[in-house]
Image (cartoon, grey):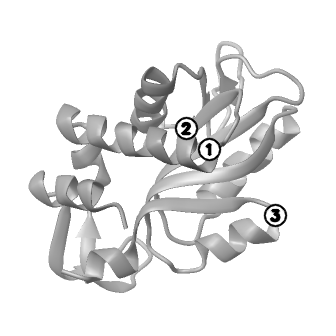
């Protein structure tokens, strides 16, 4: 567990305990308002520091960092600033104007891409984003998230050959 990240989430009130109903309709003992965390410069800095440390400790060599619009873009930007690795933004839907690109930024054929995500539950949105990046010629082997709710996301990513790493897991969150 990354104690520093968990403490930062608690300190900014992004991590809350109680009875919550999630978007999926499931009940949960905790809720993470990750937007609250990623809009606080001190918490975002902590997350970026810890993600950069994880990249270094794991010896990940990547050409690009990718975030999915909108939620994980602040994480991708902050990690890019920390590591000096350029980032790209992956859209969920094509714009109906302009260039209609699904990826903003430059992605070359065969470039290794680290996907960053705020919270992974079932991993549906990040799997979709990985498909978009792979279709554009990027190579994705790793996803790094702030919180893994441990509800099947890691397994789903493993099924497509991607390793999930998290700064904090549901198990860590529930250990008070």
Q: Secondary structure at mark 1?
A: strand
Give the residue drawn at x 66%, y 13%.
98
Could you say which disc has been placed on residue 160 in the image? 3
Q: Are marks 1 and 2 in contact (CB under 8 Å)?
A: yes
N-terminal of the pair, mark 1 or mark 3, is 1
Give the residue drawn at x 50%, y 78%.
150
- Residue 16: image location, x then y, percent: 16, 69
In the rendered image, the vertical position of residue 63 relative to residue 133, given as above or below: above
- Residue 89: image location, x then y, percent: 59, 29
In the rendered image, the vertical position of residue 78 relative to residue 127, given as above or below: above
Q: Is residue 164 left or right of residue 77?
A: right
Q: Nearer the viewer, residue 48 or 19?
A: 48
Return the residue at label 1: 115
Q: Residues within 10 Å of mark 2 (few under 14, many from 20)?
A: many
Between the residue at mark 1 and the residue at mark 2, the CA separation in whole angstroms equals: 6 Å
Q: Are marks 1 and 3 in contact (CB under 8 Å)?
A: no
Between the residue at mark 1 and the residue at mark 3, the CA separation in whole angstroms equals: 14 Å
Return the residue at label 2: 67
N-terminal of the pair, mark 3 or mark 2, is 2
In the rendered image, the vertical position of residue 25 relative to residue 66, given as above or below: below
Q: Quadrant of residue 147?
A: bottom left
Indicate the quadrant containing the N terminus: top left, top right, bottom left or bottom right. bottom left
N-terminal of the pair, mark 1 or mark 2, is 2
């Amino acid at each position: 567990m990354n104690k520093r990240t968990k403490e930062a989430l608690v300190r900014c009130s992004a991590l809350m305990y109680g009875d919550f109903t999630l978007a999926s309709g499931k009940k949960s003992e905790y809720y993470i308002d990750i937007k609250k965390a990623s809009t606080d410069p001190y918490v975002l800095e902590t997350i970026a520091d810890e993600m950069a440390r994880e990249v270094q400790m794991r010896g990940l060599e990547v050409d690009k960092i990718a975030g999915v619009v909108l939620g994980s873009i602040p994480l991708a930007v902050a990690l890019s600033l920390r590591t000096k690795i350029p980032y790209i933004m992956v859209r969920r839907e094509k714009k109906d104007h302009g260039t209609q690109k699904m990826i903003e930024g430059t992605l070359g054929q065969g470039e290794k891409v680290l996907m960053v995500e705020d919270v992974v539950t079932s991993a549906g949105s990040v799997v979709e984003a990985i498909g978009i990046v792979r279709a554009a010629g990027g190579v994705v082997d790793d996803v790094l998230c702030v919180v893994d709710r441990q509800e099947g996301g890691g397994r789903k990513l493993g099924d497509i050959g991607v390793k999930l790493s998290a700064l904090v897991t549901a198990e860590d969150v529930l250990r008070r």
